Amino acid sequence: MTDPVPTEGSANTRVRSDESWNGTDAARATDDAAARDSLTSDVRRGLARAQKALPPKYFYDRVGSELFEEITRLPEYYLTRAERRLLLRWMPELAQRYRPRSLLELGAGSGEKTRIILRAMREHRSADSYVPLDISAEFLEESAVRLREEFPDLTVAPLVADLADAIIPPSTIARPVLFAFLGSTIGNFDSGDATALLRRVRAAMQPGDLFLLGADLHKDPARIEKAYNDPRGVTAEFNRNVLRVLNRELGADFEVESFSHRAPYLVDERRVEMHLVAERDQLVTLPGIGRIRFAAGESIRTEICCKYDREQIEALLGAADFAIERWWEDGADPYALVLARPVPRPARVPRGGPTPWPGRAVIHRLERDAREHLFALDCGTAEDRRIGAEVEILLVDATTRAPAPLERSLEVVRRVAARRSWTESRSLKAAMSEFRTPHAGRITFEPGGQLEYSAPPSLSLSELARDLETTIDDLSSTFAEDGIASVSLGIDPVTPVEQTTLQLHAERYRRMDRHFNSIGKFGARMMRQTASMQICLDVGDDPYTRFALLERLSPYVIAIFANSPIYAAKATGHMSYRAHAWRTLDPSRTGLILDGADPAVAYTRFALDARTILTGSEHEAARPFGEQLAAGRCRVGDWTTHLTTLFPEVRPRGYFELRSCDALVSEWFVAPLAFVAGLVYHAPSAGAALEVLGAPDPGLLADAGRCGLADPKLASRARDLWRLAREGCVALGDAFVAGTDVERMDEYVRRFTMRGRSPAHDSLDSIRT
Ligand code: AVI
């Protein structure tokens, strides 16, 4: 399925601190076939993206390494000097106070900074071992030899590893260990990859160990731009050198001089983006990849260099379970040297005092279960392209607009059932009738009397859309004959929750109602008054990437299809009040996981942190599942039931259920289906979509629900995503999406997204006129 697309600073990026050259790196790396294959596939993938890109690790052949060294000496490139000043000023204090006995350096440097640190440690007789970590054994050995000469008492134990791998320090390493990641190399990773890398560092640490991070700070944009656009053109040469590497290693025929260097500082995104811009139209041949066309002005992004403020560093470190111990800043050229210590992972739900938690063995079992069953790792193939959907409608009295009594709705469904040969049975879960269609669709009721149609998954999006439309239209017109209006909005716009009742009385709903009421009003609103459209997709052959894509898409699905701005007859200030209700009903069980490192582990943690609803005493305040499990108040056997009470935006269930879309009128069912499937099931669109979406942004979900497409960033990305989704739909072929459905999707886009609108705007217009 989706070709996993590395971001600029993807975790397998070979990055180095400034002095850590390995002159023959790229040449040596490509000596063997495996390295050449990975270069070819990185380049193929990177150049296939909408914004062409190359991983920065290919800068560093001998020439590139020398050029970078020259950059670090440029008067404009303040980073190296600022960090050096900070190390000289603060390392003695650090060494004296914390007495680290070993230094483990990521992207190991053989240079000056390592020596400053080791000397300070030696001053306090604390330099026992030095563990430089790098991908190149040869390079590590060269620098080890030099260091052993200068520090004869020091054990130099190089660790050959990729930054994408788990960091496993030698078991004999003297503790405490100072882990160091310098040079603001962290800035070459996008925030998802940076968090994943920091988590790997965190996982290698023991209590008492420390982490030293060098990070460049946001400052006068002109100052930053100068550092990446030096007048002597060294950075430009460094940038262009990557094309020389490709010409040499792959036999490509880039005309290097016809690409110009551009490195603007994008102030809003707080990052420098380094690009190579084609000065004229050209066709480049890359053996093993093909011929790639570059239009004049088109660029290849070769690197990102993020700049931070303290809050961002705190968040980045916090997400990897670090707390800042000391913050040293260079005032002349704002740059930070940050000393962080590992902290226990905080629970999502605040707990008073020490609380029991399941042992590692139990957690491992649950994680394995998540990998095998929820994410179905190794089960899917790229060709799996089933699509399913669940559509809900609100049923209200056509005259009073009050929720229709369930018994009355049931009679109507029975009439349709008789006509369409649906069979009625009793749902154990809801203690209520449910219906099965001859082709395995299901009609059920929700606690407030909403009706849900769960269509069976199909290999054809168009077939699914027809099934949904005809079923819902048939039901709606039969309801209308009985004076019941079907409302296809995300939330009931008329009746306040106080005037509604729970219409299903199964224990599950009673307990949920009680639990949510202990938190606030949104749980009751969600259960009784919301309606959504859920889209179900296969996990494919790379479930983690697909999960990440769906999670990042979810705010856009909320914004593009928002249609629930009104509640209790008033504008709520939210384009999707439904999304707001879901998100706030109990934050321990909703929202996004946004964990790039290992979603199965993160999802298990999310589920352990979510409070139990269906197990344990009904009369005590709910506690996190993990705590209840450790205390023996529930069993591992309750896990599966517990998982059904979690409502994240994307729920893994052996397939992925995207839960972010407001209910829509049947005319538009095709639009969200095509938007999501076109992006997810067509590998090039999926790759390009990840590129458009950028790093995960936890705040976007709330913004999307509140502002919809009024948020300019969401609006412009939404348009790009539609373009990619359309390309995906067309490429998936007529048998998957019929041409008429692509046209319907176009109509939606023209009518809403292109105008920065969603159906919510129509609802707002109607109450304003
Ligand atoms: C290696 N890294 C921290 C440098 C930076 O500033 O992001 C790479 C660089 N690119 C252009 N100039 C320097």
Image (cartoon, grey):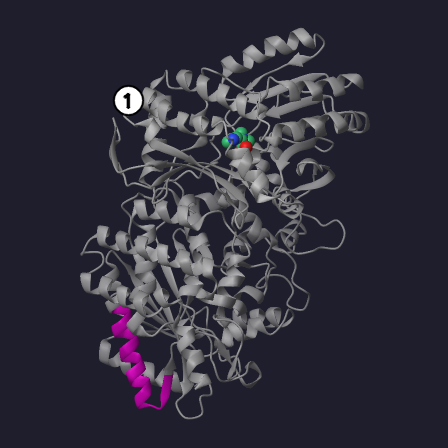
Q: Quadrant of residue 39?
A: top left
> Which image quadrant: the C terminus?
bottom left
Please name the residue shown 76% across and 29% down the image.
90
Question: Does 758 appear above or below 499?
Answer: above
Residue furthest front in the image:
231
By secondary structure, the bulk of the magenta-drawn segment is best described as helix
Residue 470 in magenta stretch:
yes
Q: Quadrant of residue 521?
A: bottom right
The image shows a total of numbered marks equal to 1
Residue 495 in the image: x percent, y percent?
51, 84
Q: Is residue 623 above or below residue 484?
A: above
Q: Is residue 556 above or below residue 603?
A: below
Q: Nearer the viewer, residue 305 or 70?
A: 70
Q: Amino acid at mark 1?
A: Gly
The magenta stretch is 467-485
Q: Residue at x 39, y 77 (%)?
A: 762
Q: Quadrant of the N terminus?
A: top left
Q: Which residue is mark 1?
A: 251
Q: Which of the pair 518/247 is nearer the observer?
A: 247
Kindly tell me whether residue 695 is visible in this rendering.
yes
User: Percent x, y for residue 558?
Assistant: 44, 64
Q: Is residue 208 left or right of residue 451?
A: right
Asked if residue 182 can be seen in this view, the reply is no
Q: Is residue 441 magenta?
A: no
At mark 1, the secondary structure is loop
Among the 4 quarters of the image, the one containing residue 108: top right
